[in-house]
Amino acid sequence: MRRRPLSWSFRIPGGPTTPWATCSHLGRELLIAGGNVVDAGVGAALCLAVVHPHTTGLGATFWALFHNSSSGSPTALMPGPAQPLAPGLRLPSALPSLRLLHARFGRLPWSQLLGGPASLAQDGFLVDTALATALAARGTKGLCPLLCHADGTPLGAGARATNPKLAAVLRLAAQAPAPDLAGDDLLSLLVRDLGLRRPQSRPTPALEPAVQRAIPQGVLSTTPGPSTCPELLAMVGAALRSGEPGPDPCPALSAAPVSPVGTVLATVDSSGSVLLLTSSLSSPFGSGRLSPSTGVLLSDLVAKPTASAWACPLLLQGSSDDTEADMLGLVASGTPAVARVVTRALLSHLAGPQTQAQHERRQGPTLSTSVCGQGTLLQVAVQAEHAHVSSVPSSCCTVQGF
């Protein structure tokens, strides 16, 4: 049976759509406080770093695509090459990445974005079904006492978790005057806590012009290499030329759902700007190495060229000459197979509802956006003063927002 998409329509301003309602609310409050789409998105991402440690966190790797409605120019946030902190552990780049994005495009003070996530980590949050399911599947080894009861059993859905050490790190990062110092604060604590040698290199996130490709319906933008996003554009172009949707994006479904390895969010504001953001710890709970004095789980995403193959947020602007043209954003998490799913979703959108319905009557449903049961595809369409957000998540990943 096809899984029907969850969808929301709203009059801009709306706010972020994230996998956790509290993080969506937090981002919306930042918009109401005078922030822009980057403030709201970064604040929501930091919130997810607290409440969803199985998919993201300060040890995670972040990619983003930002469309600035004022200039009409899309910009990509790139995490830089994977740099090891120790064998099997990646040098954390989340704080300098998000701080860099905010420093260039944000409006509110950096400290204001960290206040809500820090309070959530200090005062506690309720474990949701997604986190409880991932925790039950993995077990608690290396994750106590953060996600365990006193007897060592995993926290279940509805239990309250706190992370005061992470709250302290977020407050420390709020005082950092520059993007690189935001990462240095965390790194100093990690190397001391884990008894590691301080690495010679630092995280090297960068803001780069998006890779663009003109198609008859507008202009496609995505993040540049070394990700596989340029190949995604080529895949879309080939499918448009052939008129065919391409091979089945999910040729072999696994018998049981696979825990997600990343998270996604999409944010729009009243000006028509769009931010798509995706992050990953590579494996569920990353390396499973919890730093006791920081409350941070480190990623095991080190020198895996295919691990970020799906980190390809995609934007379609109706016209490169019209800054008020309709926008479509697609952002996914899961396995490399989602590149094919994103292609199918885009082609389905371009075909229009009538053409799509005719094709389905002839050949059956052509699009399975459940990402082969292993992730989430989030779609945001901005038209004039309205936005429509839809998602078909896997059974473990609800997406909530405005």
Image (cartoon, grey):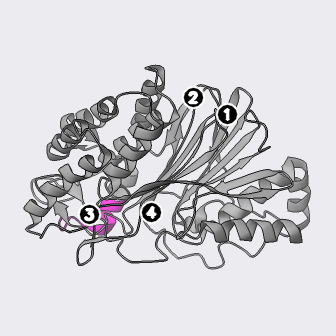
- Can the viewer see residue 340? no
Query: Could you tell which of marks 2 and 1 lies nearer the N-terminus?
Result: 2
Residue corresponding to mark 3: 298
Q: Earlier in the sequence, mark 3 or mark 4?
A: 4
Q: Tags 3 and 4 in contact by the CB under 8 Å rule?
A: no
Separation of marks 2 and 1 at Cα, in angstroms? 8 Å
Mark 1: few, some, or many residues within 10 Å (few <14, many ≥20)?
A: many
Q: Earlier in the sequence, mark 1 or mark 4?
A: 4
Residue 233, percent from left and from top: 70, 65
Label 1 is placed on what type of residue? Ala
- Say if 247 sits above or below 277 in the image: below
**SS assignment at label 2:** loop
- Mark 1 or 4: in front is 1
> Please, what secondary structure does the residue beneath circle 1 have?
strand
- In the figure, 36 relative to 188: above or below? above
Q: Quadrant of the N terminus?
A: bottom right
What residue span does the magenta drawing correspond to?
134-144
**Residue at the top extreme, as displayed:** 33
Secondary structure beneath dot 3 equals loop
Which residue is tagged 1? Answer: 387
Tell me the kind of residue under disc 4.
Pro
Are the residues at dot 2 and dot 1 in contact (C-beta closer than 8 Å)?
yes
Residue closest to the eye, 27 or 212: 212
Residue hosting label 4: 260
Image quadrant where residue 223 sits = bottom right
Quadrant placement of the C terminus: top right
Q: Marks 3 and 1, how far apart in space?
A: 36 Å
Image quarter of residue 109: top left
Q: Is residue 140 magenta?
A: yes
- Tell how many labels: 4
Q: Indicate which disc residue 14 carries.
A: 2
Q: What residue do we see at 17% from left, 53% from top?
A: 146
